Amino acid sequence: MKLEIKGLTKRFGAFTANDHIDLTVEPGEIHCLLGENGAGKSTLMNMLYGLLEPTEGEVLLDGKPLTFSSPGDAMAAGIGMVHQHFMLIPVFTVAENVMLGREQTRGLGVLNRAGASAMVRELSDRYKLAVDPDALVEDIPVGVQQRVEIIKALANDAQVLILDEPTAVLTPQEIDELMDIMRALKERGTSIIFITHKLREVKAIGDRISVIRRGKVVGTAPPTASEAELAEMMVGRSVKLKVDKPPADVGKAVLEARGVTVVDSRGVPVVKDVSFEARAGEVLGIAGVQGNGQTELIKAMMGLIKPSAGEIWLAGENISKHGPRESLEDGIGYIPEDRSHDGFVGSFSVRENLVLDLYRNDEFSRGLALDRDAIVANADSRIEEFDIRTENRESPVSSLSGGNQQKVVVAREFSRPLKVLVASQPTRGVDVGSIEFIHKRIIEERDRGTAVVIVSTELDEIFALADRIAVMYDGRIVGTVSPDIAREDIGLMMAGAHEPEEASA
């Protein structure tokens, strides 16, 4: 099925999110879509899937114009979408999730579960997806859950499949398996629109690569194009993709976790007897698939939750019982994984957010009153230094792009002397230009003698920044290795399948 997008435009008031976009996806083609945050990729896909109505332009399938008023219309026309955040019900089986919304019944309205299981099994076998239709979704790995989402789309006879950031939560092995699945779909004639920010992946799987910048398609390239060329098309300038990192000048241990255990609200251990040390002048990378205890470990380090066992030490002081304010005052900088929830107040201005955890300092207050002039001067300085793209210092942070929101958080945390920098998913949802800038600042902080702890599900980021890599699986650190380790080995460690002999505590 040939998909054509002609002059597709979407305006929100005076703002144009998509500006006369033309795009063609051939039958059986994997067409990759690249673009910065706020470039218009999601808006375009939401129009294709019936979630938004275009202001201008048209969508054609095999030459026939289509109008979608809902996702149901898109699915009926043969367009399916696998969202970045899965739309599955954990307590249902795979088959029950697939049949949801298109239930088949036998006499007296009884659900035909056997028929649904047979359909899932047939699709699974046909496309080599290896999914058990009777497994509970909550019991299967994230990579298999993604296959369930693909089966849901195929069950609706999708001829055009949109994959939105499909590799964000997968191990390297699961990414390879997904690419094999995409190739199998392609061989059977399914057209795929693959949205990702990972240049390595579009080169590995794409037939063509289209780049969107500021709401317009600025070019289409073959997969033979270099990563540097693709990055420049995305950002509009040359981008340094490799982190310039001199050898670490490693000092004493600054932050230590000693046998830390964290139990969640259900009484289930999610961090299990974890010990490590972060040393002055080095980056300790913590790698792992999301959901293996990293989030809870970082929150325990920041005093957001209390360990049920073990201790956390900072520069020779036990801070296990310190709260988040004390942790910040102790000299720990914190870039949280969910910036919108933990990193800023969206309705507050850029100026206010830049002193959100600093306003009590003498620099910004006079007794009980805030020193507005100092806060304004700080904002102007940080906006320039960190290249925060904002209309002005009084703009609410919620009005900024994701990359610039992250720069606000980074600028604030780097604006005071630090003993330790804890950065969790520091470039999640951030485009290549902002990634380059944030990585550069992290290494500069390391080179000032700060101990840096980076938690990331992005292996490229871990390899680029880390001087040592600790791998977490099932709430434990299963090994600490050199960044010289092979990607395959660290991927196996992330999946709990292998611990290299050279791994050390």
Image: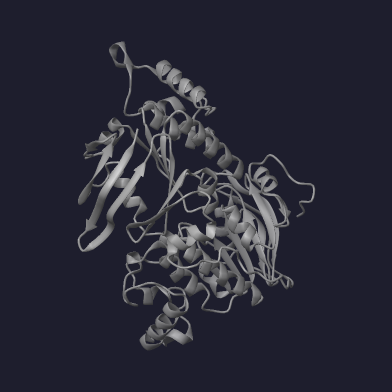
Q: Position of 252 compared to 404: left or right?
A: right
The residue positioned farthest toward the right in the image shown: 501
The residue positioned farthest toward the top in the image shown: 107
Q: Position of 374 compared to 488: left or right?
A: left
In the image shown, does 334 or 102 lie closer to the viewer? 102
Color encoding of the figure = one colour
Q: Count the marks.
A: 0
**Residue pictured at 47% horizontal, 77% vertical:** 358
Q: Position of 172 compared to 238: left or right?
A: right
Q: Is residue 138 visible?
A: no
Quadrant where the image shows the N terminus: top left
Q: Is residue 73 above or below residue 396?
A: above
- Residue 302 position by quadrant: bottom right
**Residue pictured at 47% horizontal, 75% vertical:** 386
**Residue pictured at 72% horizontal, 56% vertical:** 484
- Residue 156 position by quadrant: top left
Q: Position of 240 compared to 353: left or right?
A: right
In the image shown, does 144 or 58 lie closer to the viewer? 58
Q: Position of residue 476 (x, y in %)?
A: 66, 48
**Residue pictured at 32% horizontal, 58% vertical:** 215
In the image shown, does 160 or 404 lie closer to the viewer? 160
Q: Is residue 50 visible?
A: yes
Q: Position of residue 141 (x, y in %)?
A: 55, 37
Quadrant where the image shows the C terminus: bottom right
Q: Position of residue 86 (x, y in %)?
A: 43, 41
Q: Position of residue 402 (x, y in %)?
A: 41, 62
Q: Is residue 497 above or below residue 233?
A: above
